[in-house]
Amino acid sequence: MELAFSAEDNAFRDEVRTWLVEHAPLERRPRRGVAMREFDLNWQRLQFEAGWAGIAWPVEYGGRGLPLTQQLIWYEEYAKLGMKAIDTRFVGLSHAGPTLIARASPEQQADHLPHILRGDVVWCQGFSEPEAGSDLASLRTRAELDGDELVVTGQKIWTSYAHLADWQELLVRTDPGLPKHKGITWVICDMRSPGIDVRPIHTMDNGEDFCEVFYDEVRIPLANVVGGINNGWSVAMSTLSFERGTAFTIDQVQLSSTVERLIDLARDRSLLGDDEIAHSLARARADVAALRALTYLGISRNLRSPEPGPEGSMLKLQWADLNKRIMRLAVEILGATSLAYNEEGEDIWSELFLLSYGISIGGGTSEIQRNIIAERVLGLPR
Amino acid sequence: MDLLPTPEQEEIISSAAAFLADALPPQRTRELIDEPSNVDPKAWLAAADLGWFALGLRSDLGGVGCGLADEVLLFREIGRSLAGGPFLATTLAARVAAFGGDAQLGHEIGAGRQVGFGVLGPGGTLDPGGIAGTVHMVDGHDADLVLVATHKRAGLFAPADLGDLVALECIDPTARLARATTTGAAPLVAVGADVDPVGLRGTVLVAAQLTGIAEATAALSAEHAKNRIQFGRPIGVNQAVKHPCADMAVRAELAWAQVAVGALATDEARADAELQGLSAFVVAADAAERNAAATVQVLGGMGFTFEHDANLYVKRAFLLTQLLGSVRLALSRLVLLPGPL
């Protein structure tokens, strides 16, 4: 067991830190629309040109092929900038991209992976439906085979950035006659196809990133099917286990910086003499330390065996609970100041507080994470 | 960075687990409840022969030369096994003697001379001159030495110097308890945290033991949830049982990860070692207490009996959280430290 990073890793960290400090766009990120998309993609382009795109992606797919420890170091240094971790690039870089690497054909990989890394495109996810949330496999969006095309009709929901996306990783039902996990197909959908209607959903944090997507006889070439017709469930599961593994590392590391900022805030306001606040902050400090330790343990396991381990769901569950508790503590420390919803200002605690309610729902609810841990890790009956 | 045990460390884990299962299984720990001392002399000397009490002590000071990261592997197994006896006080005392300049005493303690754990009561003080206040002595029934440690310093005292020792029944029946009040007693040997952070090491080792308890109780609950049939199905199909089992597993996993980081931060003399060590204690105390409590609940009536081990885990977890100052005191210090690296 060893906590210290290797000399090589430390040199890499110095290089990352120097570059990020010099190049990260510190002006405020536009909160919505095309301006937000362009901000994110410009930032990705800057990283790509400097050779920082796809640090842990294999070299043959345009990545650097570096070990997960160096990906972690990039995340840690990135988190210190205080920039938003999950932006319009997230699905492409952390979801669709890794799935394409794992399951797509060489042609599909060549068509899409370079554009994701270069910051040319935004991807979104078409998984959940009004009647298929936690029970994802009961999805009903229908795809009929017609010549060399799929004709898609149905509805998706909770699709972040659908209104700004070029491509979508879409799950459709290709064979309603098969058992529900068997008749699903994972397909690449061009968001500019005729028959797609995107409607934004206003969320409780005043966001407009969420959308409903309607499909009315949308034609998708069969060449866009990834992993074969009716094989989409196993393709989707490789994406989701990735999401529960390392994809949220930036947020976990950022939570540690958040607690440190809150301790500073409380000290400035002479609140550390209040035992309840002081102890809540201390407990938050201990809990984010343990969350980071579990991230490290997960990466240690990953270096020996590439399959994501049980810590994926554990990290997601704990991060969501902890985030909620810490953001509640933040608005408690700010008191009446946090009544002002100042989305353009420096202090966005009120926004983060409201956003925290969604974190225990998105990417698999906390209840589903507990089921996964109990059934797949502990072996409890379903 | 690698938080997984090396093959040598795997060997520490498996040999400790095998020794405890053979020499000090819960059944033996229960037999010792009715004996004057909770120490099995044969098992104790065998543990000393295995180098347990000097495992983390430098070899030039007569120790085995391993790190705190190796010691936490051992103490996690002790916690899991429910074995009673002054393992922690004896291990820390060997360091106080060795770093305090009494090599002979260090050697004797390493060879199995027992040391009790002196818990300083509220308002009690331990300064370079000595100790004052009420001391609860945990374990070390036959011991002629008692260890008292804070985050600033640690000292070894003669129990006779602390005044009249009154024997008490301990909330944990597998432990022994006595109390004395002194207006001032000088240490036989002492060491400051700047020379060796005995208190911090003890805090991390307590956290390791608490983690063993958190893991053992999580496993007991999951096993029961799978096997206990009610309404024609295992009770673990119900989310009211299933989700607490998942939460127990998460708490145990987080506790172990942070104990590993806490131990390594001390071994590697990192600037944030105290923050990481105190965090390990806070997280592991929460995991052990809540997992043990939830296990009593998951096991229902059986969990409330003395015959089942669940209650012994509840009691041991509480005892451990009191040895080096409460969680509340740890939190008060933790918030004032400089931030993590």
Image (cartoon, coloured by chain):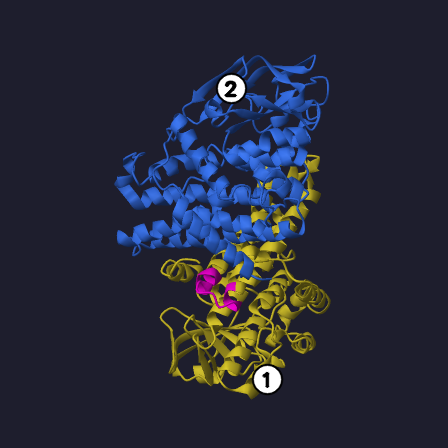
Chain colours: A blue, B yellow
Say which amino acid is labelled 1: His
Res. B171 in view: no
Up/down of B42 relative to A152, above or below: below
Chain letter of disc 2 in the image:
A
Q: Dot 2 surroundings within 10 Å: few (below 14), some, or many (20 or more)?
A: many
Foreground pick, A352 / B143: A352
Q: Pointer 1 and pointer 2: residues touching (CB < 8 Å)?
A: no
Q: Which residues are magenta?
A: B265-278
Say which amino acid is labelled 2: Val
Can you identify the residue that label 2 sits on?
Answer: A213
Q: Secondary structure at mark 2?
A: strand
Q: Are labels 1 and 2 assigned to the same chain?
A: no
Residue A3 place in picture, x, y as percent:
54, 60
Q: State which quadrant residue A130 falls in.
A: top right
Up/down of A136 relative to B321, above or below: above
Q: State which quadrant residue B83 falls in.
A: bottom right
Q: Secondary structure at mark 1?
A: helix
Q: Tell me the residue at 53%/20% (across/down).
A: A191
Residue A106 place in picture, x, y as percent:
67, 32
Q: State which quadrant residue A224 falls in.
A: top right
Q: Tell me the residue at 55%/86% (across/down).
A: B103
Can you identify the residue that label 1 sits on?
Answer: B107
Q: Is residue B111 left or right of residue A265?
A: right
Q: Is residue A213 left or right of residue A231?
A: left
